[in-house]
Amino acid sequence: MSASRFPLAPGSTIGIVGGGQLGRMLAMAAARLGFRVAVLAREAGSPAGQVSAVELVGDYGDPDAVARLAALSDVLTFEFENVSAAALAAAEGSGAPIAPPDRALAVAQDRVDEKGFLNLHGLATTAFAPIDTAADIAPGLERLGAPALLKTRREGYDGKGQAWVKAPGEAEAVFAAIGARPSILEAKVEFVRELSVIAARGWTGEIAAYPVGENRHEHGVLRTTTAPADITPAARQEALRIAAALLRALDYVGVVGVELFELADGRLLVNEFAPRVHNTGHWTLDGCQVDQFEQHIRAVAGWPLGPTEPLARVQMTNLLGLDAGAWASLAADPGARLWLYGKSDPAPGRKMGHVNRLSPL
Amino acid sequence: MSASRFPLAPGSTIGIVGGGQLGRMLAMAAARLGFRVAVLAREAGSPAGQVSAVELVGDYGDPDAVARLAALSDVLTFEFENVSAAALAAAEGSGAPIAPPDRALAVAQDRVDEKGFLNLHGLATTAFAPIDTAADIAPGLERLGAPALLKTRREGYDGKGQAWVKAPGEAEAVFAAIGARPSILEAKVEFVRELSVIAARGWTGEIAAYPVGENRHEHGVLRTTTAPADITPAARQEALRIAAALLRALDYVGVVGVELFELADGRLLVNEFAPRVHNTGHWTLDGCQVDQFEQHIRAVAGWPLGPTEPLARVQMTNLLGLDAGAWASLAADPGARLWLYGKSDPAPGRKMGHVNRLSPL
């Protein structure tokens, strides 16, 4: 951390790679603090571009486009983790500091590397086996037990690019079904609940974590997060310990989202982490004085992290696809705090907005 | 209200005349609800333009510029009241609905018309006399008592364009000092406190009001608002009655700010009203689920008004000029919720941002 550069003064420009709703809410948080925002979006008029001073249009993997964004920016950040190595190299060469660090992005991009990194730092995950060919599946199944979950190592999200393998005889077919790509086989986790922790780390090493949220998925896509989750103090401590250990191990700067499985015996396994603001942290927009988006901007700009205490219990519900058509009734519901992302095409399952419902703690 | 036009669907464009901090916070609120925003600003890179999809540059009084904005907009609104008649006519001719209505803007632009309108609708103000020439001042002083406050009828804000007249012999000099323009002479008000009410009315006539705030000015400029003000239930009722009566009398749509003088005997006089979101309502940004900016967007877009209950007691402090240089220490104060407006020139007295400090109700 260059002492002269941080904290960035108001009026500095935050560069955001990605034009989606996470970039949009980051841009709005940056504006609150007096920053200018420049975004790199795939299409003009993107959700983030609509609320930013500058919108560059280009591919996130195009080194020239990323370099153009970096040239305008006092710090560069990302709203998603699947940034190409070429784009990262362009960002690195720009001279603008980058947060989160490239290592966090690289580790998070590969499920084998991610679990290996976590285990190396004493953070438990489900057992797994790297799968390069269909022939690797049978020995993997034998070791991990059947059924086991086959996922592509890279990309794939919201339940895409993954399938169950119930028996060795299915190996070829399932491997083909997910694209016959380098993969990971994961032992089935008999979890009680899915939890997540949203935490942040600053350039000086300062760490702050929000209360743990409990997540419910439908068809592989997040449907609701409820926070603070109704968990034991011990589970809460353990979740925060995991998040802090991960942030330190990655020498991380910014907000991270860590997804956890809670087992029947109380243990927590890390499912995965996202090196960015996270859908399971949207409850903080109405549930905390400083939400995850402002926290990320504070972190990457070298500002002190803000308070993370909850003001209320919040249930966040994603509006997927045509769900957003209910905007008029949601607008009329005094208990519903509505966020819409400025997207015009309500494709099935597409995240169009979310609603936060508050109740007393 | 055209049933087919309202409520405006997400993705519709809100046109805002004015590029300052009020437009900025309106644009951010509109984005939350999924609207696009187009602003007309005097200079490129304005506080509002930085967070809007479209920024037109032009003079607010230029009918062509206003017409260009209206052509892009599904509804047209204003962040300030001193819009020229020519600009209003251009807006009227655009076909896009306009809120607040031109009558409210016209009445608020002229201090004599404003007080006359208020009195006509049974809303008490201080006694006043229209002043066309310096010769009108002596008879005015005789009727109202000395000292009395001479203000220009039009424009002038934050204490500019006004001066005290202590004796008839000063009439010529004071009239000259405020520009020898059509003016108003106001009887001195021996008030205990300055209060304000932020209230909203929708296209359907629905009204919602926030708790009353107590304001403290320094050198004619608002320094702090504390809300909810520590006033009697009767005073609160009276303040809300005044705001509602004014909204109805103006057939108003949008948020209005009504400044009140509280007298020693408990009576409330209207000082003035602003047909727009108001500095004394900035506390709602952190003190209510739906802040005044979202409320204004809801009102002009034909959405149901949101809840106005306070979540906390808030003290809002304006950051004027170099005050904003304290951003680093304010950022480090967990009790301070900071808002900065994206202005680069901290001219003395210029509103650069504000801070909300919350405490339990």
Image (cartoon, coloured by chain):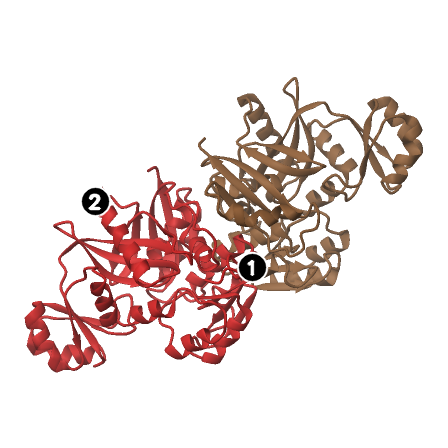
Chain colours: A red, B brown
Query: In the orientation shown, which residue stands out farthest toward the top?
Result: B265
In the image, B213: left or right of A265?
A: right
- Tell me, for residue B51, which label it has, or none: 1
Q: Which three-letter amino acid code belongs to the residue tagged 2?
A: Ala
Q: Quadrant of the C terminus of chain B?
A: top left
Residue A224 as seen in the image, left or right of residue A20: left
Instruction: Name the one closer to the observer, B187 or B361.
Output: B361
Residue A221 in the image: state x and y as whole percent. Answer: 28, 62
Residue at position x 53%, y 69% from top? Answer: A55
Relative to B26, A138 lies left or right: left
Q: Which residue is mark 2?
A: A234
Figure quadrant of residue B217:
top right
Label 2, secondary structure: give it. Answer: helix
Q: Nearer the viewer, residue A124 or B150?
A: A124
Quarter-wise, where is residue B161 in the image?
Answer: top right
Q: Residue at x 36, y 43 (%)?
A: A310
Chain ID for label 1? B
The secondary structure type at the circle numbered 1 is helix
Q: What's the amino acid at mark 1?
A: Val
Neighbours of disc 2 within 10 Å: few (<14), some (14-19), many (20+): few
Residue B131, numbered circle: none
